[in-house]
Amino acid sequence: MRAAEVRLLAFLGVATFFEGFDLLALAQVLPDVRAAFGLSEWETGAVVAIANLGAVLAFFLVRAADRWGRRRVLLVTLVGYAAATAVTGCATSVWTFAAAQLVARFFLLAEWGVAMVYAAESFPAARRGTALGWLQAASSLGGIVCGAAVPILTDGPLGWRAVFFAGLPVLLLLAMARVFLPETPRFAAMERTTAASLAILHAGYGPRVARLAFLWAATYVCTQSALPFWKEFAVRERGWSDREVALALTVAAVTAAPAIVVSGRLLDALGRRVGATLTLAATAVGVVLAYRAQATWALTLGVVLAVFGSSAVLPALNAWTAELFPTELRGAGAALANNLLGRIGYVVGPLAVGAAAGQVGWGVAVAATALGPLVAMAGVWRWMPETRGQELEVSAALEST
């Protein structure tokens, strides 16, 4: 990649870094939060579901990227996420905690979605999948930092609250640095539009939105339950210590990071369909192993595959979500397919798992969600066109199979 492209990835990687950090942070502090506020299994699942509802509401900010521009939304989201994270650390009740996490996810997932659109519009077709893979690998880097830092932070006087204060100086510095981020050339050259979000449906893209939303939702039902509840499972049903869990998650993130980069390159080398199939399969196998295996090595391998699959499947889905809509509707397409409709699985999955865990345990409840990626695999081969190596203007005009 050119030096300018590397710098751009560094700026955009903030979104996925903190997405990975935030996801593993919640997974690691959830037992502490549950003990502090005296939560049941169902209430624990409800807290995660409420937090994830912010990802659905992020629809409005991602949609705004078609009106305000990609750059402006990225600036707003970074500042908003920093503020909401600070409030999380100051929460005095479980509902304040859940509401603050909802707002944090609202800004974080809007930033993540717009960052993917920004990258898709800024990189040439031959390197688009690789760029998205590098961005998603930053999520694993966030997980690595989180896995190493959380045990140290929680041992301090602030306990679990320190986890939500640790990244604030970095976030504020990066917010100031992003002032110098330019707008994407495609958006800058586009004639401005004030069309409503439903204009994308009137333009004939309704079936495409529905199919992508199905893939996102089926995937999220699994991935957004797999990691948040794994510490609960490992401690309560396998007798692991906090440090053993932190070590396993750190090993998983370290191992997954280079594999995620490779998965992005596979999208450009082998195509979107093959790449998505491999990562969806890894996700399903990993979740079953992580929640049903008995041996330490098998549990750790399961977590590695689950972390890898949960992150590596996203570049493929993001590639299609960006490539199958024209520039003037790309933000609306991502907002509708992913944030508004696809994220239903993001909310329903943890809520259903929390309700079932009280009856059958965390292991059985979460392992059952592995059906989601398998269903998504069938949808990939039934509906998705192959867009490898095609410019956005060409892929947006393709017919779905």
Image: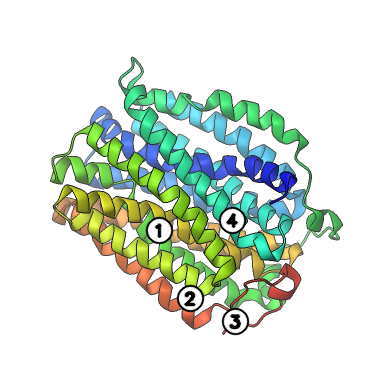
Q: How far is disc 2 from disc 3 in space, using C-alphas?
A: 10 Å
Local crowd size for mark 4, using a 10 Å CA cut-off: few (<14), some (14–19), many (≥20): many
Check whether the beta carbons of the residues at disc 4 and disc 3 lie within 8 A of each other. no
Q: Is residue 197 visible?
A: no
- How far separated are the C-alphas under marks 4 and 3? 22 Å
State the image quarter where residue 78 is shown.
Answer: top right
Q: Residue furthest top?
A: 157
Q: Which mark is residue 336?
A: none
Q: Residues within 10 Å of mark 3 (few under 14, many from 20)?
A: few
Residue 175 location (% of width, % of height): 66, 31
Using the numbered discs, state the Cα–Cα distance from disc 2 to disc 1 in whole angstroms. Answer: 16 Å
Where is residue 54 shown, x and y percent of the image? 49, 46
Q: CA distance from mark 1 to mark 3?
A: 25 Å
Q: Position of residue 197 (x, y in %)?
A: 67, 62
- The three-letter amino acid code for the residue at tag 1 is Gly
Of the image marks 1 and 3, the number of the one nearer the N terminus: 1
The residue that label 3 is drawn on is 400
In the rendered structure, which disc, 2 or 4, sits on the residue that comes first in sequence? 4
Q: Secondary structure at mark 3?
A: loop
Tag 4, which secondary structure? helix
Residue 253 seen in the figure:
yes
Alpha-carbon span between mark 2 and mark 4: 18 Å
Which amino acid type corresponds to the residue marked 4 in the rendered image? Leu
Of residue 297 and residue 245, the one placed in the foreground of this image is 297
Q: Give the mark toward the camera: 2 or 1.
A: 1
Residue, disc 1 = 309
Query: Which quadrant of the structure image shows residue 77?
Result: top right
Q: Say what secondary structure mark 1 lies in.
A: helix
Q: Which residue is mark 4?
A: 132
Query: What amino acid does circle 3 point to?
Result: Ser
Instruction: Quickly name the residue at label 2.
Output: 380
